[in-house]
């Protein structure tokens, strides 16, 4: 597998819209072959629906040996997506992406991931190469970082995410 850095595929999905809603077909085998992920073995899927803007989810990851490569597929809404290597959480390693419906983000297995919703009704699909492992699942509390980044104090974040360890000073300064 050659995925070393996150890779954004803008407007990658063809979306068919009509009065009923939308249909988002995606040829997964072609996606994997085209982006050097031929040996990616689909194991786990997660759907994330966030109704309200100004919501933060993250920064999550799984520790080795259960770290996951993520294929993040934006089906609706807009987010500010933030990733960084979880073993080197420093400000200079942060990568941000403004994602909208039709975009796909490929995230390496050594990256923590989080997103801030910029619109109503954000629907994201994740395809991962390893199953969820509760004993390996962890993350960082990103409230201070995202509050400063978005210049807002009214951010919705889960109690579980608030209990995660804080990011170091070098990250948020």
Image: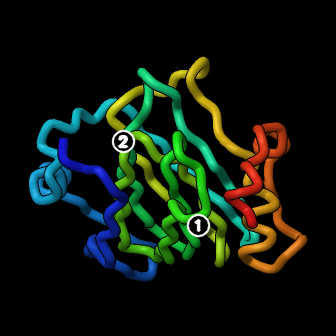
In front here: 22 or 131? 131
Residue 136 sits above or below residue 164 on the image = above
x and y, in percent, of residue 145 in the image = 74, 63
Instruction: State the residue in front, 76 or 57.
Output: 57
Is residue 141 depicted above or below 102 in this figure?
above
Q: In screen coordinates, is 90 left or right of 54?
A: left
- 54 lies left or right of 100: right
Residue 150 rendering spot, x and y as whole percentages: 74, 77
> x%, y% of residue 13?
28, 71
In the image, taking residue 136 as reference, residue 173 lies left or right, namely right
Farthest right residue in view = 153
Q: Position of residue 85 (x, y in %)?
A: 49, 48
Which residue is under mark 2?
Answer: 69
Residue holding disc 1: 122
Asked which secondary structure carries label 2, the reply is: loop
- SS type, badge 1: strand
The residue positioned 47% from the left and 76% from the top of the image is: 100
């Amino acid at each position: 597998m050659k995925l070393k850095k996150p890779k954004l595929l803008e407007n990658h999905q063809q979306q068919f819209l009509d009065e009923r809603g939308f249909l988002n077909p995606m040829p997964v085998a072609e996606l994997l072959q085209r982006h050097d992920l031929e040996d990616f073995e689909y194991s786990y899927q997660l759907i994330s629906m966030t109704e309200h803007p100004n919501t933060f989810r993250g920064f999550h990851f799984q520790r080795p040996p259960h770290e996951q490569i993520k294929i993040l597929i934006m089906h609706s809404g807009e987010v500010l997506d933030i990733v960084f290597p979880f073993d080197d959480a420093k400000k200079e390693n942060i990568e941000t992406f403004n994602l909208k419906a039709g975009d796909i983000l490929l995230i390496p297995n050594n990256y923590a991931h989080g997103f801030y919703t910029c619109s109503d009704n954000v629907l994201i699909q994740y395809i991962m190469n390893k199953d969820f492992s509760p004993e390996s699942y962890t993350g960082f509390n990103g409230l201070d970082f995202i509050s400063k980044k978005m210049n807002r104090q009214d951010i919705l974040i889960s109690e579980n995410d608030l209990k995660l360890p804080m990011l170091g000073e070098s990250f948020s300064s």
